[in-house]
Image (cartoon, rainbow, N blue to C red):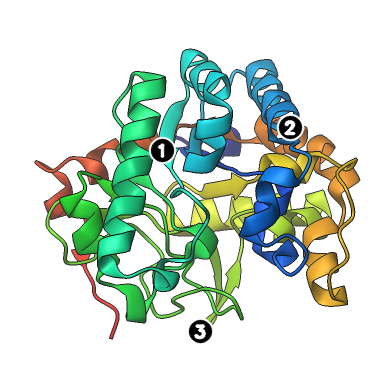
């Protein structure tokens, strides 16, 4: 294991991006229902291109969990991501929470998205991230469906308490959810005593001062002696996006500190080593070796 004296190179950490437009975000759903998405001004191409520039400047490769509806409207964007050396993974087709779909509908959703992404990108799609981290005890059946649809890993569990998502009793490290061939790669969390706190990016990263987040992330990597797993959305580096009228809590969650996000990301990319999800967790994803490396765990 590398020396702890050089924290940047302690591990290659997993960097991931959920490719969705600003109006796909659940916090804005009251003002942007699915039936008007096609009528709303899209900004995902510009914000994702800026994301690619950030990664190119830092010489970082990442995993992009792409919505099928984004890929359908912007196939050239998916090709650009793949040609830059990033991993293409699935975020489902229309940003449905898993529990909004029946198992049959979920299978069609993830199968159609996987086929579309593979046809456009020309590379296999191994990974899936549920919108809003919506795999939980009630939707544990989703892992069997993911295996049936040919996926090899999921990154759909945030093992923290939250009002919209979370499986706070789940392992904080990669685990086997019981479906043959599938490994779950949970997002990074901070353990303080018996309490867990979100530490993997998104709105929490925008909210916290960078020096504080950096210190927390270094502590987690050192304490867990494992890579961290970070995520964000392209719309988070787009402070010029339209301000939709939603209730105060949702408005705060979506719009807080958008103008500071790009600068903070540049610092994060400099201060830690990052790589694609499939590279960081190659051993865990491998069907041959992963079974021995990850505990099996099922939600009660």
Q: What residue does disc 1 label? A: 89
Question: In the image shown, does 77 or 199 lie closer to the viewer?
Answer: 77
Spatial CA distance of label 1 from label 3 is 33 Å
**Would you say residue 67 is visible in this rendering?**
no
Q: Residue furthest top?
A: 83
- Residue under label 2: 47
Give coordinates of residue 262: x percent, y percent.
80, 36
Q: How many marks?
A: 3
**Residue occupying image coordinates x 86% and y 59%:** 244
Instruction: Of the two numbered discs 1 and 3 on the same chain, state the one appearing first in sequence.
Output: 1
Neighbours of disc 3 within 10 Å: few (<14), some (14-19), many (20+): few
Q: Secondary structure at mark 3?
A: loop
| Image position, residue 170 (x, y; %) | 37, 74
Against 122, is 242 above or below? below
Nearer the observer, 102 or 165: 102
Return the mark for residue 194.
3
Q: CA distance from mark 2 to mark 1?
A: 18 Å
* Residue 239 drawn at (x, y percent): 88, 43
SS at mark 1 in the image: strand
- Mark 2 closeness class: few <14, some 14–19, many ≥20 residues within 10 Å: many
Q: Residue at x 42, y 59 (%)?
A: 156
**Quarter of the image where one finds residue 283:** top left
């Amino acid at each position: 294991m590398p020396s702890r004296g050089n924290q940047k190179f302690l591990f290659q950490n997993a960097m991931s991006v959920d490719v969705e437009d600003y109006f796909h975000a659940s916090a804005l759903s009251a003002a942007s229902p699915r039936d008007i998405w096609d009528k709303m001004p899209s900004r995902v191409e510009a914000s994702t291109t800026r994301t690619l520039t950030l990664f190119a400047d830092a010489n970082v490769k990442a995993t992009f969990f792409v919505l099928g509806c984004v890929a359908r409207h912007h196939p050239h964007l998916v090709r650009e991501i793949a040609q830059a050396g990033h991993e293409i993974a699935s975020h489902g087709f229309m940003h449905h929470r898993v529990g909004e779909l029946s198992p049959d509908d979920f299978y069609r959703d993830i199968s159609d998205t996987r086929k579309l992404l593979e046809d456009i990108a020309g590379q296999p799609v191994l990974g899936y991230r549920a919108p809003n981290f919506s795999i939980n005890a009630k939707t544990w059946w989703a892992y069997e469906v993911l295996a049936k649809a040919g996926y090899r890993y999921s990154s759909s569990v945030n093992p923290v308490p939250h009002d919209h998502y979370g499986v706070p009793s789940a392992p904080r490290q990669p685990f086997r959810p019981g479906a043959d061939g599938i490994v779950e790669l949970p997002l990074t969390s901070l353990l303080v005593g018996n309490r867990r706190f979100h530490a993997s990016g998104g709105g929490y990263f925008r909210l916290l001062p960078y020096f504080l987040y950096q210190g927390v992330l270094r502590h987690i990597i050192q304490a867990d002696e494992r890579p961290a797993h970070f995520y964000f959305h392209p719309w988070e580096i787009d402070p010029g996006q339209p301000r939709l009228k939603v209730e105060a809590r949702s408005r705060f969650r979506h719009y807080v500190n958008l103008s500071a996000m790009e600068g903070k990301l540049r610092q994060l990319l400099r201060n830690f080593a990052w790589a694609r999800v499939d590279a960081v967790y190659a051993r865990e994803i491998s069907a041959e070796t992963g079974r021995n490396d990850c505990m099996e765990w099922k939600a009660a």
